[in-house]
Image (cartoon, rainbow, N blue to C red):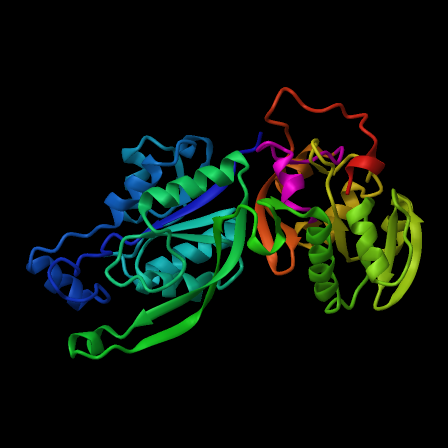
Amino acid sequence: MQPLCFGLIVNPMAGVGGSVALKGSDGEVIQREAVARGGSPRGSDRTRRALGAFASAGDVRWLTWDGAMGERVLASLELPCTVLGAPGGTPAAADTRAAARALLREGVDLLVFAGGDGTARDILEAVNQKLPVLGIPAGVKMHSGVFATTPERAGELMERLVRGGLVSLVQREVRDLDEAAIRAGQIRPHLYGELTVPEPGGFLQHTKERGVESEPLAVNEIVAEVIERLSEESGPVVLGPGSTVGEIKRALGFEGSLLGFDVWRQGSVIAKDVDARWLDQNVESARVVLSFTRGQGFLIGRGNQQLSPGFLRRIGRESILAVGTRTKLKSLDGRPLLIDTDDPQLDREWSGLLEVVTGFEDVLLYRLSDRENDADMPDAATDLEDDRE
């Protein structure tokens, strides 16, 4: 199975000003003063703690920056990595931003960084909400909501992503305090924006029935979320098979084909039960809404061969809107969602973490792979009408 690709950025001076009462570590002047007072940076040590709690760290492909910004920590744990670049001298905020942009260009599944609120601000400036990020708490000021509670919790969350646990994808604030004002006895917090962050995701309270998800209610919430998203689409929307997507079709105002693909655009049905040739000849770009088979986990490649490799390459991975309840994801027992397009290279390219809409304003981050990681795979002949929901 294709390994997930994680990016790592360590702020090697994070936390250096904390123990020596400097109220922060931002800027070279404060960092030099902190070192002169005997302050100790925490970024590297706390990153080691996080990766030490990440049992599957060796199963991940790591991309990072040279030296103390990541490569040194990974080497100390004997974790192979690809180094994309190096700081121009003593690592500074500009190097963090450059590293984050490089990792974004490389398409990592998750950007992991160690630092404090200042580092979070640099990450926000570089990537905004274009990829999920996870902060290892290592700074002095950590008022932002992007950090795990401890380094070990960060490692456990990364483990959950790799092993197929339920992980929510949420927006969390990046906040920072004015360090000069703090030293003058004033608290001046400022909101800089939000980053997309993974969090442990069990069943949410609003979808519970005696501690178990109510699937009919969850499906209704999925429909509401998808309809809201599609209201902003100006191009065609290709809606796949299954009962969950069928409910979306009804909410859009038409009775679609249960096991086929229907095409809708801005309030009108363009075509029903289309085949691969029709899509290839008539749709240049589109949003594609897909569910997956319960137990098997096939998102692409079982019951939807109408999506040819050429069509998929043309619309791009970002055009896929996957939907399914948390209970359906739990039925996979940690196995990934699967892709089998008859184009192995495309399958490998599209493998990685994928957003799955599981309710209203409720999104999980789940693995998509070209290979099953469990030998006891369910029978591929299972009736799709029953299982693709």
Does the magenta segment cover residue 190? Answer: no
Quadrant (top left, top right, bottom left, bottom right) of the C terminus: top right
User: On the picture, is 173 further left or further right than 322?
Assistant: left
User: On the picture, is 377 further left or further right than 249?
Assistant: left
Residue span colored magenta:
323-342
Residues 212 and 148: in front is 212
The structure residue drawn at horizontal position 73% and vertical position 50%, both measured from the top left corner, is 216
Residues 181 and 305: in front is 181
Does the magenta segment cover residue 326? Answer: yes
- Residue 374 in sight here: yes
Q: Quadrant of residue 183?
A: bottom left
Quadrant (top left, top right, bottom left, bottom right) of the N terminus: top right
Q: Position of residue 149 (x, y in %)?
A: 34, 51
Q: Position of residue 173 (x, y in %)?
A: 43, 66
- Residue 352 in sight here: no
Q: Position of residue 129 (x, y in %)?
A: 52, 62
- Tell me: residue 262, above or below residue 310: below
Q: Quadrant of residue 263?
A: bottom right
The structure residue drawn at horizontal position 52% and vertical position 46%, both measured from the top left corner, is 109
